[in-house]
Amino acid sequence: MRYATVGLIGKPSHEATHTSLNILIAELTKRDCKVLLETRIAGSITEHTHAASLTEIGEQADLAIVVGGDGNMLGAARVLAEYDVDVVGVNRGNLGFLTDINPEDIVAQLENIFANKVYREKRFILEAQVFRGDKLYEAHSAINEVVLHHSKVAHMMEFELYVGSDFVFSQRSDGLIIATPTGSTAYSLSGGGPILVPHLDALTLVPMFPHTLSSRPIVVDANSEITLKISSNNVDSVQISCDSHVVIAVEPGDYVKIRKNKKHLTLVHPPDYNYFNVLRTKLNWGSKLY
């Protein structure tokens, strides 16, 4: 695989991230790659690089390398998913479900990447649209999840849930998590939702502290359109969050539509990548008995 232009994205003001970026720049320069450095960190690392925004990296790069944790990956991936660019993560965070290259393995894994000895996969993403009356008020995309929640802590709201044209339930709760398989190991997991393997074409709907003993997470076809109708009985405004990064204010009487985005995120993993091995490692599951 020929990657002529490579974009580098990293956590600003983070010494370990800068160490990894300098290694990457040196190795990529040896390969005569044009290196685009995301503008937030370009001021501190200038040698053999060009400053570029995330959008410019998406437009120009063949490969984008994100150095940091899953939060850094999510912030970059929402933009990069709009473009035809491979994305790989170097873990300088905590869990690292999406950033799965160890910093100590950067040089060896670059060899694999440029030799096309990788595991490449496409992850679908979501689009959340908030409608006020019959007009689109605001829309954003999400890699992990779209969350309906109250603007105040520990406040319940009323809403209705529809899957396609089918009414599912009305509920009084703190909100609802709509998660992709990628996001099933994030906020959804903390809320008691199931883990969905990445290639599964499904969504999980996880109620947040519902005022009932019978409410449970639901798994639905990812090609379904999810509609949330916000009750006019709500006194205060509620919010829609996309990956906990982008927040949209939602008023009583608004409705929210959540569906698959037409774009995909293309992730590149090491050749020995195995999703269940990731789960065992990150979630401290037991190893084989013998």
Image (spheres, grey):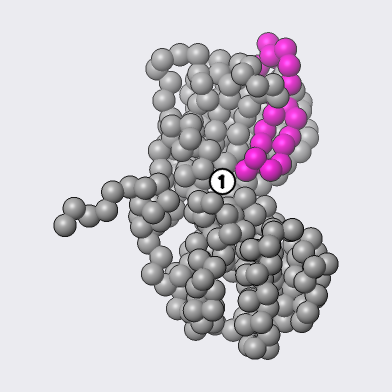
Q: Is residue 251 left or right of residue 209?
A: right
Q: Nearer the viewer, residue 40 or 82?
A: 40
Q: Nearer the viewer, residue 206 or 95?
A: 95
Instruction: Indicate the position of residue 219 as horizontal and vertical percent values.
Output: 42, 36
Above or below for 196 versus 227:
below
Q: Residue furthest right?
A: 43
Q: Residue furthest front?
A: 15
User: Residue beneath label 1, please?
Assistant: 144
Q: Is residue 239 magenta?
A: yes
Q: Nearer the viewer, residue 12 or 162?
A: 12
- Residue at screen point 42% across, 51% down: 282
- Residue at screen point 65% across, 88% down: 30
- Residue at screen point 68% across, 11% down: 233
Instruction: Indicate the position of residue 23 as horizontal and vertical percent values.
Output: 63, 76
Image quarter of the N terminus? bottom right
Above or below for 148 versus 47:
above
Above or below for 17 versus 168:
below
Q: Which range is magenta?
A: 230-250
Instruction: Indicate the position of residue 169 as horizontal and vertical percent values.
Output: 50, 20
For the residue labelled by badge 1, is the local secondary structure a helix, a strand or a loop? Answer: loop
The answer to whether any part of residue 56 appears in the image is no
Q: Residues within 10 Å of mark 1 (few under 14, many from 20)?
A: many
Q: Is residue 48 magenta?
A: no
- Residue at screen point 74% across, 58% down: 13
Q: Is residue 38 left or right of residue 244?
A: right
